[in-house]
Amino acid sequence: DVKVTQSSRYLVKRTGEKVFLECVQDMDHENMFWYRQDPGLGLRLIYFSYDVKMKEKGDIPEGYSVSREKKERFSLILESASTNQTSMYLCASSLVREGRETQYFGPGTRLLVL
Amino acid sequence: AQSVTQPDIHITVSEGASLELRCNYSYGATPYLFWYVQSPGQGLQLLLKYFSGDTLVQGIKGFEAEFKRSQSSFNLRKPSVHWSDAAEYFCAVGPLSTTSGTYKYIFGTGTRLKVLA
């Protein structure tokens, strides 16, 4: 079974704090993703990574950065948290077989920025 | 532009009734299509996926979906809903090429299912 874990289920931070969200997958997947989920907006892609140290901006990268130093770990960083970053953050990794890709998700981190 | 639409924000059905959740997409070629389910406070779980071949796809938990190219749809169905099916359901479509030559997927805004006892 594919297992994607996220370091925290719930986080409460203050405006201006630096926030790290960690994601680990145990299936040697090449690609990893960070999404945020907000009511009525569905999932929006923040950043993704297709290899170690490689990253690409998604649809809403502003205010975020990422790090992928090891294949199994993909971190999302909020350099200076703001209240509009209060959201549910979902990590995913993907299995690619014969050009066909399937994403598998972690349990999510619900972040509250006060 | 590629897009995916889930027209129904909320759906309420009685336990034991049949269910159909709608998903419409806009895509230039034959897409890859997915349905995920999210229980409250949880991540997304893959229900089923379509890459090619048989247009009727069977998934987990008794769900199925049918790819209809002429209607640009990939609707999710279940013949008899259980109270435990109450959740939010997301349709996704891709692949969309990116600047790095990799691919990403886009997700609908979700349909929240309520099941009446």
Image (spheres, grey):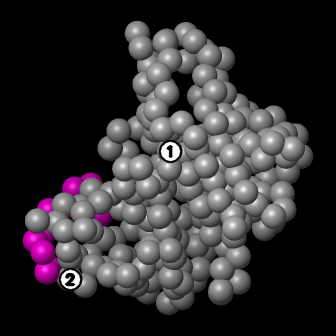
Instruction: List the residue tagged with mark 1.
Output: B110
Quadrant of the rendering where the N terminus of chain B is positioned: bottom right
Q: Is residue B95 left or right of residue B39?
A: right
**Rendered image quadrant of residue B2:** bottom right
In this rendering, the label closer to the viewer, 2 or 1:
1
Q: Which span is picked out in magenta?
A: A6-18
- Residue A99 in percent (x, y) is at 78, 67
- Residue A18 in percent (x, y) is at 19, 81
* Residue type for callout 1: Gly
- Residue B77 in percent (x, y) is at 66, 27
Is residue A11 a member of the stretch shown in magenta?
yes
Q: Is residue B110 left or right of residue B64?
A: left
Label 1 CA crowd tier, 10 Å (few <14, some 14–19, many 20+): many
To the question of a shared chain for discs 2 and 1, the answer is: no
Is residue B114 a member of the stretch shown in magenta?
no
Whether pointer 2 and pointer 1 mark residues with C-beta atoms closer than 8 Å, the reply is no
Label placed on residue A80: 2
Residue shown at the point (74%, 43%) measured from the top left: B73
Real-space Cα distance between discs 2 and 1? Answer: 30 Å
* Residue type for callout 2: Ser
Q: Farthest bottom residue?
A: A53
**Rendered image quadrant of residue A98:** bottom right
In this rendering, the answer to whether A98 lies above or below B116 is below
Residue shown at the point (70%, 52%) measured from the top left: B25
